[in-house]
Image (cartoon, rainbow, N blue to C red):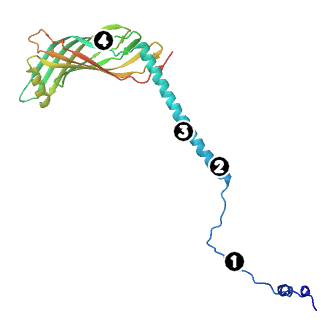
Amino acid sequence: MSDPASKPNGNAAAATNGNPGPVKSQLYNPNRQVYRPQSHYHRRGQRSHRNFCCCCCFWTILTLLAVALLAAIVGAALYVLYRPHRPEFSVTNLRIAKMNLTTSADSPSHLTTLFNLTLIAKNPNNHLVFFYDPFSVTVFSNSVPVGNGSVTAFTSDKNNQTSLRAVLSGSQDLDTDSLTSLRSGLKMKRGFPVEIQMDTKVKMKMDWLKSKKVGIRVTCDGIRGTVPSGKSPAVASVVDSECKVDLRIKIWKFSF
C-alpha cells in the first residue's frame, strides 16, 4: 500500500519539469500621467511668501493711519492753542477821478478811468505774522474790468492794522457786450457797481512754524460809484462794502 504523501504534486511536477504556470497580463497606457506627489517644502514656501506680503500690507496701512491720526492731533492742538484767523481787509475810501466813456460810429467805444483806493489790512492773530507779496489789483464794474494797478509788498505783524493805497487806471476799447453791460450799470440810480479784486501770495509764520507761500484772493464788493463832474473826483459809497478772503493753507513746514 503506497503512502499518499509520497506521491508528487501535479503542479509541483509541472514546475519542476520547466513548464511555467499561467502569468497575468499587465495593461500599459502611454497617455497616462505619472503621479508625482508635491513637495511639502514648496507648499510651505508659497504660504510663507503670501504671509509676508499680508504682513507688509497690514503694517503699511497701520503706519499711514497712525501718521494721519498724529497729524490730526497736532493740527487740533495748534488750533486750540493759537486760534488762527484769516486776515481781514476793508475799503475805507475810493475816489473816482476819471470815468470817461467815448463812443463813435467810425471807431470802437473807448473807456478811460482813474481811481484812488485806500484800504485797511488787519491781522487779528496774536501769534501769526503774514508776509505779503505785491498785490495785483483789478477794478470791475458790472463784470467789466475798468482799471488795474498794484499794492506794494508788506508785512502784517501780530494783532496789527496796515493802511494801503493804490492808484488804479485803465484805457481800453470796449466790445459790444462790455459796452452794453457798462452802460447798464451807469444808468443805475444808486450809482454804478464797483468790485475790487486783489491777488497775491502770502507766507505765514507762527512762532517756530513757517508755511510755504500760498495764493490769496481778496474780493471787495458792495461799493457804489458815480461819474465825476468837472475836475473834482467823485467819492464812492463804501458803507455797504464787504471784503472776502479766499486763503488756501497747505501743509506746514517746521523751521527753527
Vertical placement of residue 86 versus 65, above or below: above
User: Residue tagged by mark 3?
Assistant: 57
> Dot 1, how many residues are within 10 Å of its Cα: few (below 14), some (14-19), or many (20+)?
few
Vertical placement of residue 129 versus 107, above or below: above
Left or right, 184 with reference to 28: left
Can residue 126 be seen at all in this image of the molecule? yes
Q: Secondary structure at mark 3?
A: helix
Contact (Cβ within 8 Å) of mark 2 with mark 1? no
Considering only order in the chain, which callout, 3 or 1, is on the residue closer to the N terminus?
A: 1
User: Residue tagged by mark 2?
Assistant: 44
Considering only order in the chain, which callout, 2 or 3, is on the residue closer to the N terminus?
A: 2
Mark 3 → mark 2, Cα distance in angstroms: 20 Å
Mark 2 → mark 1, Cα distance in angstroms: 38 Å
Can residue 175 be seen at all in this image of the molecule? no
Considering only order in the chain, which callout, 4 or 1, is on the residue closer to the N terminus?
A: 1
> Dot 4, how many residues are within 10 Å of its Cα: few (below 14), some (14-19), or many (20+)?
some
Left or right, 7 with reference to 80: right
Left or right, 62 with reference to 81: right
Say which mark, if any, is on residue 121.
4
